[in-house]
Image: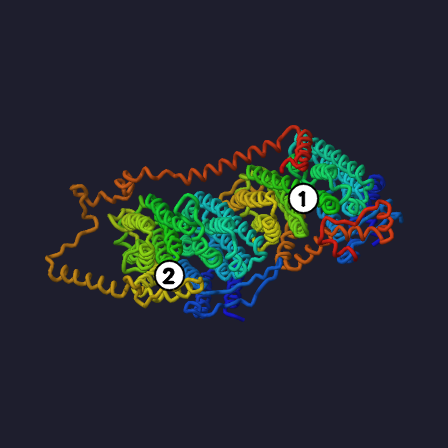
Amino acid sequence: MDNLILVVILPLLAAFLMPAMARTSEVLARVTGLMVLFISIIIITSVWGSVDEQAVSYAIGGFRPPMGIVFYIDQLSLLFALLIPVMILLFWPWNKVTHIREYSLMMLLTASASGLVLSGDLFNIYVFYELLAVASYGLVVAQGRAGKKGEGAALAASLRYLILGAVGSVMMLIGIAIIYTQAGTLNLAHLALLAPEKLNNMAGLSAFALILIGVGVKAELFPVNTWVPEVYGAVSTRLSALMAGLLSKLAVIVIIRVLVLLFPQPEALQLMTILGMLGVISGELVAWRSRDMIRMLSFSSIGQLGLVFVAFSIPGDMGLMAGFAVALHHLLVKPALFMLASGWTGPLESLKGAAKQSPYIAALFVLLVMSLLGVPPLPGFWAKLLIVVNLASQAAPVYQFALAFVLIATVIEAAYLYRVVMILYHPNQGQQASVREKHKAFELVIASGAAVILIAVALQVQSMETKLSSMARQTGDRQHYINTVFSKLDLADIYHQNKVQQTDFRSNNQLQGSK
Amino acid sequence: MSVLDEVFILCALGALVLFVFHRIRGIEKLAVVFYAALLYLLIKMSGLGYGGEVIYSSFSLNILGETLQWRFDAVSWFFAIITVASGLFSAVFMSGKWGESYREKTSNAAYGTLQIALLLNVNSMLILLASGDLLSLFIGWELVSWASFMMMALNPDKQARQAAIKYIVYAMAGAMAFLAAMAYVYGITGSLQYAELAQASAALSNGQIILLSLLFFTGFAIKMGLIPFHLWQAVAYAETPAPGAVFLGAISARMGLYAIIVVLIQLIGLGHLQQIHIPFTFWNLQTVLAWVGALTTIIPTYIALKQNDARHLLAWHGVGQGGYMLLGLMTLNSLGSAGGLLHVFNYATYQAALFMTIGAVIYRTGTANFDKLGGLVTQMPLTFMVMVFSIIGLAGLPPMNGFVSKWMVYRSLLLDGEPLLFVAAVIGTLGTILSVYKLVHNTFLGQLRVEHQNVREAPLSLLIPMLVLAAIMFVTGMMPGLVLDWVASAQLAMGLVPVTYNLGGIVLASGGLDMIWITLILFYGLGVGAIIFYLLGGRAKRVHQYDNYAGGHFLTSRVRYHYSHNFYAGLMHLIGGWYRGSFKKLEQAIVSLVSLLSQLSENMYRSAQPAMMVIIVVVLSLWSISGGIN
């Protein structure tokens, strides 16, 4: 478990060393990046399954929390720690022309993303989040210059992304500052302990709102997501896939951690519901208008992220489970769709009859789209069912509105996705195949892989359900988090210092507290 | 292993084999064998049609704390036997000459795809019919929707493609209404089992019942094409390749009826709906549904009257006939509900036969457009005969089976003291009679067109299923008791009082119906007429088809005359003003609204001041969490 820190350290080192190494040997630098990713994957798979029952915390440098820096490793963070190197590896820029700078940025992305999911205190989360942001700005700008739309559009997109990201970071920082002034600590476990007393007030809620909106920029939260369509339209589909699939989910994970540990107040959840459902409906509405595959997928991604927020805003473990289901499903499907879209650029009308030229790709597209829509028995259906069923059983009226919005959005989604399917299967040929870009092999491999996983999950839906629900239970358990990070001795100390009664918002979590 | 397991294994096997070998010639024969085997398995289960025990599948699935299970009861069996028989007839229809010509026009692969689409439709409908809880019902529901979509998307024609897209939007809206209803059921009862809902429905508040029935009914009504969701169905069904139209037209839309039976009648209970009064009216929820049925018999039928393509005319009728079934079921009494159910069977027989006759006409002439047809009776007499049999059934006249079921619905409405609904149903029937006359007149009567002089009778592979269907229509019309056995068992399974019947028809204290007598008297009358005509009459002169007069003018055989364009001009002069296309306008209005909202959202995403927006949102959020929204 101790070497898990290497998952952050190694890519960080590599990120800084690679440009230097490239001066002596370009090949060595490229290989280093891949090696680091493989090592990360090996490290994580070696500890896989060890936190199923009991999460583990790891104090860096041996300083005990709340003063020291803590890594918190549970099923959620381990899953994402694995997904990060795997996804980066899948979307690794293999071609020779890529500048070494880009590899270096990818490494930085890996390091900061891993740090983000593993960190156990707000300050580190902020630092890693900023690193992640810098890496992604860099990648967008680097990609934008080689973009397809010409430099102007790409530059405008990067600028918008940068401005929104910067404002978002400031918001997040203000939110963290408010939390610090209220509670005097930034360690998440310590905060979780203090939250019922110190953060259960207006100041706390506004801190959450600021963090939600700040981090929401990366998570494609409505309405701070206006960069999404432009950036995805300007950068390569490889990077869009990575951003829509992985980076957005990382930001969501940050919000979920904060929400579960510090702010289980209904107001906080409802704010998220409202922004989520506006995201769902607006994203799908604009996607319906789009006449270009990438743009359509970008807006569909906004809609799906809205759905993720709606799901996570449902109180209780069931909400977390629904959120994980729909987030992971999107993480699987959207990158695959982006991969398919990269060979199908240009106006949708020009794709007429594409299915005749490439029946296999069109069939993949249909399968992915059906899962995205939630057609049983594909996994997307179970995710959607979880959301719908849990929304309907909530009493607060905002959830009923969210339910209506989600369902209406699905109808719109069906309308535009199936319009594309009909265009693909159009009997008349549109643009000639020779004019159109061909799909690259790795794109097809990724999309096929996603399809295989989808079918496998559809067949193994019962065991998936068990896994997700155990992950949700562990993530939603505040007391578990606190007890994992602090030893009994620490706790006694803290109680003594702060004279805090051990109270809890959630009665159902108290049972597991004594573990 | 139960018979139901065997059915599912056979379905899976059939799908697999067809999917692998669909390009190979001769696959059509295998498909026919498949449907025949499926029919054999259903006949093995025929105990269900005579009051047998429910048959469970040994396969079940545990998920989200729910047990998904599949089983067949009398209602499922009743619908399943119609489904599989329709599948078999379609498969036979497309197995011979028709299939060859379709292959020539398209390709082996396209023909194979058509076979796959038909098979998936049959399979998914069996899965739907076998569902044993709300979740499996929903899964079956979605599968049926996507299978029909596949069938509709096969026609490359522009109109057909638009219809398919429209269908998907409607179907998805229906599915989402269903999903929402299901979610509320889960919220209320904590389970999706039928038994739990049936138990809980007794304790539901009026508001909950209204919400649930409205959502469920919307979902199911869209599939059935009931008013006001009738716009999608006719074009979508009519434009599929002929065997697809036969199958979809005969049974596919009835899945909506099946779901209404299962959820609204069996689980929520019509008695329950009856207790809920609509404020400021004399109506309760059940009467509202009955009126939806009544309006559905009228409006689509009169839209059918205006169609100028035989397939569209029939498909619009299909929408209208659904209204009779719903109307029958909503009467609540044993006679009316039996009539509604019996109509499902009867309707399937003649709708399938009608689509087959039109398929045969298209096969021979290449068109179903009324302006380009006429006088085919001399060339295709057997096809003509089948069509006449079928339209007698569709119009609900004796001695065909359609008469029996419509009589039962009318009779129960009168007995129930619902004269207005009765009148509405009769108006619907009037429209049916008018339009089926238009159908048979414009295709088969009048003078033959020059270009059709060499048209021959439909090939045997097309004729056989048509003639068998005609025979079924006649036999079950004369002896409705054969089918009423199944209907009565289905009624028992639905929790209704079964109708009292005998082989010849209905036994009723206030005057029953005996079709054997009616048929005998009809033939007796015809026989007497024939004797008078042929033996006692004067010398008869054979009149040639071209030997016609119009307005006192003799028409030479060089000028072919057939009045088909703007048929019923006089009638349209009277009622033409009623066709306002209000529902179409409503549909367009909704599309425009979505378009407007979408434009507004896009403007938001194009905003030039993203940072400003963040700040505005932060302020609004802070305001909202500080209690602003409450």
Q: Position of residue A355 (x, y in %)?
A: 54, 47
Quadrant of the image containing the N terminus of chain B? bottom right
Q: Position of residue B169 (x, y in %)?
A: 50, 45
Residue A322 as seen in the image, left or right of residue B584: right
Res. B461 visible in picture: no
Whether tag 1 and tag 2 are in contact, CB under 8 A, the answer is no
Horizontally, residue A249 falls left or right of residue B167, namely right
The amino acid on which the numbered mark 2 sits, given as a three-letter code, is Ser
Quadrant assignment, res B371: top left
- Residue B342 in view of the camera: yes
Real-space CA distance between mark 1 and mark 2, rounded to the nearest whole angstrom: 52 Å
| Marked residue chain, label 1 | A
Q: Secondary structure at mark 2?
A: helix
Foreground residue among A454 and B111? A454
Is residue A226 depicted above or below A461 in this figure? above
The kind of residue on which mark 1 rests is Pro
The residue under label 1 is: A266
- The answer for which chain carries disc 2 is B
Residue sitting at x 33%, y 39%: B578
**Mark 1 secondary-structure assignment:** helix
Q: Position of residue B491 (x, y in %)?
A: 41, 63
Same chain for the residues at labels 1 and 2, yes or no?
Answer: no
Mark 1 surroundings: few (<14), some (14-19) or many (≥20) residues within 10 A? some
Residue in front for this viewpoint, B248 or B540? B248
Above or below residue A508? Residue A338 is: above
Q: What residue does disc 2 label?
A: B334
